[in-house]
């Protein structure tokens, strides 16, 4: 039985012929809360990939005013038509991108990081989903960011409200604390030592020199050297503070989805 591929213009190509349909890639990544909905990043990646592949770019269609549900259904249909998904930086903290990646993996579509080419598996998606505990609620982190930007444009600011209250002995009330980071638990003296390392680095280079980006292994090597120096009893500098500085830098890059800086060797896990 002959199988055919239907192109967007309606023409048909017989599979197995010299004119097989091109390998199709769907682009996924953060949009909500990003400047200009992250269109520059999507369009730049699409332009590069289109030299060799057919690219389905969600930014090619104007769905201004459409609901989130309508946009997601459209994106899922495009994923159904692709051979693989490529994810732009920031996908780890994007509810929409994580949803698309999970759907693709469930449908057997391979997913890769656009910057590094590394494969993304279900375990990675589940790990990052744990940082979005309210995925099923109407007001997700991404939507709240969008609403906050809209409100700030009018000179106002939105205060997130769970609807639950705590009442204190003096009569004051406040929103619930469950599920929120408790910063008062961080030891202040240890935190001050780490701040001193950042301060010295700012004076030596510039305040955000580290944030310009370095390979993860640069930070890991430095952290481990400082840990070894501390184990040996060296007191020439604050080795523990310096080690924390390096690890915090990597943690920040992970939060930003800077997989382009992750040059760690990927070892197989048995």
Image (spheres, grey):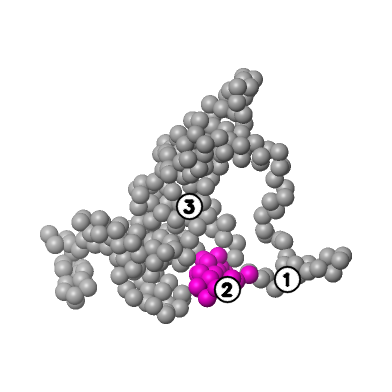
The CA span between labels 1 and 3 is: 31 Å
Taking the image as drawn, is residue 76 in sight?
Answer: yes
Residues at marks 1 and 3 touching, judged by CB atoms closer than 8 Å: no
Give left or right: position of 62 versus 135.
left
Q: What residue does disc 1 label?
A: 164
Residue at figure coordinates x 83%, y 65% from the top left: 168
| Segment tinted magenta in the rendering | 136-159
Give the mark, 1 or 3, whose residue is nearer the N terminus: 1
- Residue 11 lies, in percent from the top left, at 16, 74
Q: CA distance from mark 2 to mark 1?
A: 23 Å
**Picture residue at 56% right of the left edge, 39% below the top:** 198
Q: Dot 3 corresponds to which residue? A: 256
> As displayed, is residue 160 above or below residue 215?
below
Check if mark 2's residue and mark 1's residue have beta carbons within 8 Å: no
Residue located beneath label 2 in the image: 156
C-alpha separation, residue under disc 2 versus residue under disc 3: 27 Å
Residue 22 is covered by the magenta coloring: no
User: How far from the left and from the top, in percent, is residue 188?
Assistant: 71, 42
């Amino acid at each position: 039985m002959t199988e055919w591929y239907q192109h967007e213009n309606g023409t048909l190509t017989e599979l197995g012929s010299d004119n097989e349909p091109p390998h199709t890639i769907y682009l996924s990544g953060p949009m909500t809360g990003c400047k200009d909905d992250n269109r520059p990043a999507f369009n730049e990646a699409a332009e590069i990939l289109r030299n060799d592949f057919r690219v389905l770019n969600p930014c090619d269609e104007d769905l201004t005013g459409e609901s989130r549900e309508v946009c997601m259904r459209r994106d899922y249909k495009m994923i159904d038509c692709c051979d693989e998904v490529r994810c732009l930086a920031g996908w780890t903290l994007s509810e929409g991108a994580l949803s698309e990646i999970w759907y693709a993996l469930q449908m057997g579509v391979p997913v890769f990081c656009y910057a590094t080419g590394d494969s993304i598996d279900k375990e990675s998606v589940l790990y990052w989903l744990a940082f979005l505990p309210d995925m099923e609620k109407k007001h997700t982190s991404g939507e709240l960011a969008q609403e906050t930007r809209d409100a700030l444009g009018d000179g106002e600011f939105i205060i997130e409200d769970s609807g639950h209250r705590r009442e204190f002995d003096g009569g004051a009330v406040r929103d619930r604390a469950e599920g929120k980071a408790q910063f008062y638990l961080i030891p202040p003296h240890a935190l001050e030592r780490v701040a001193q390392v950042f301060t010295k680095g700012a004076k030596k280079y510039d305040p955000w020199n580290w944030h310009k980006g370095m390979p993860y292994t640069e930070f890991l090597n430095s952290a481990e050297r400082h840990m070894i120096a501390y184990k040996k009893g060296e007191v020439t500098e604050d080795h523990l503070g310096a080690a924390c500085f390096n690890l915090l830098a990597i943690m920040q890059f992970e939060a930003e989805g800077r997989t382009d800086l992750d040059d760690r060797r990927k070892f197989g896990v048995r």
